[in-house]
Image: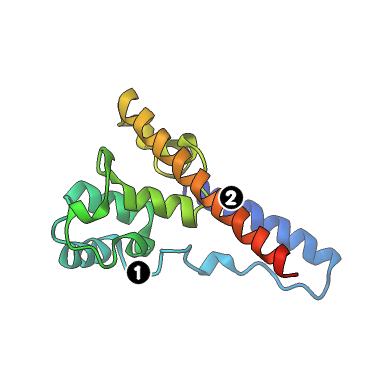
Amino acid sequence: GGKITTYRKLAEHAVNKLCEVFSDAGDAWTKQVPLPGGEFASKQQLTDELNQAFPWLSDKQVQRFVRQYGKLCYVFLQGKSSVSELGQDFGSGMHQAEVDYLIEHEWARTLEDVIWRRTKQGLRLSEAQKANLEQYIVEKVSTMTSQISDSVSDVKAVS
């Protein structure tokens, strides 16, 4: 296993230690449960499924989506019928729909979050592509933050 397996084992060990103190708590249960997006029989099965559903994706994109997102890639692929519908191309097969997913669902807030902590695309993007992506992320996060702030103000005004 990799980092995720190690983190899971460490977390389960910590939970089991807590169970010694909190007798009502149940034992760790995550070992037998797939991680989010991991509800598929095999990588090949999901690869075939994605190739069938989205024949316009490149083989590299499909393989990366299977590896990085599993079935969660459907969140940003569903309803799309062409690469152009994925939005702006930031390079190396990374498009706006994927970046939006990372921001909206995986709490990515910075360029480093997107290209190193979530995707490792930093290995493939040029400095110009990184700068372009960073500008997009800053604008997207700023817009979201502003919308949240406006919503909070609206709630306070009603209260």
Query: In the picture provided, is 24 more to the left or to the right than 158?
Result: right
Q: How crowded is mark 1: few (under 14 residues within 10 Å), some or many (20 or more)?
A: few
Residue in front for this viewpoint, 152 or 87: 152
Residue with the most extreme front position: 157
Indicate the position of residue 65 as horizontal and vertical percent values: 31, 53
Query: In the picture provided, is 27 more to the left or to the right than 50?
Result: right
The image quarter containing residue 81 is: bottom left
Task: Tell me which residue sits at (79%, 61%) in the image.
Answer: 18
Indicate the position of residue 29 as horizontal and vertical percent values: 61, 69
The amino acid type, in three-letter code, at marker 2 is Tyr
Indicate whether 60 appears above or below 21. Answer: above
Task: Tell me which residue sits at (44%, 51%) in the image.
Answer: 102
Q: Which quadrant is the C terminus positioned in?
A: bottom right
Residue with the most extreme top position: 127
Residue bearing mark 1: 40
Task: Tell me which residue sits at (45%, 41%) in the image.
Answer: 139
Figure disc tally:
2
Q: Which mark is residue 7?
A: 2
The amino acid type, in three-letter code, at marker 1 is Phe
* Label located before the other in sequence (1 or 2): 2
Indicate whether 40 appears above or below 132. Answer: below
Distance between the alpha carbons at the discs numbered 1 and 2: 21 Å
Residue with the most extreme bottom position: 24
Q: Residue 53 carries which label?
A: none
Where disc 2 sits, the SS reads: helix
Indicate the position of residue 157 as horizontal and vertical percent values: 71, 64
Indicate whether 2 appears above or below 148. Answer: above
Indicate the position of residue 114 as horizontal and vertical percent values: 44, 41
Query: In the picture provided, is 134 more to the left or to the right than 26?
Result: left
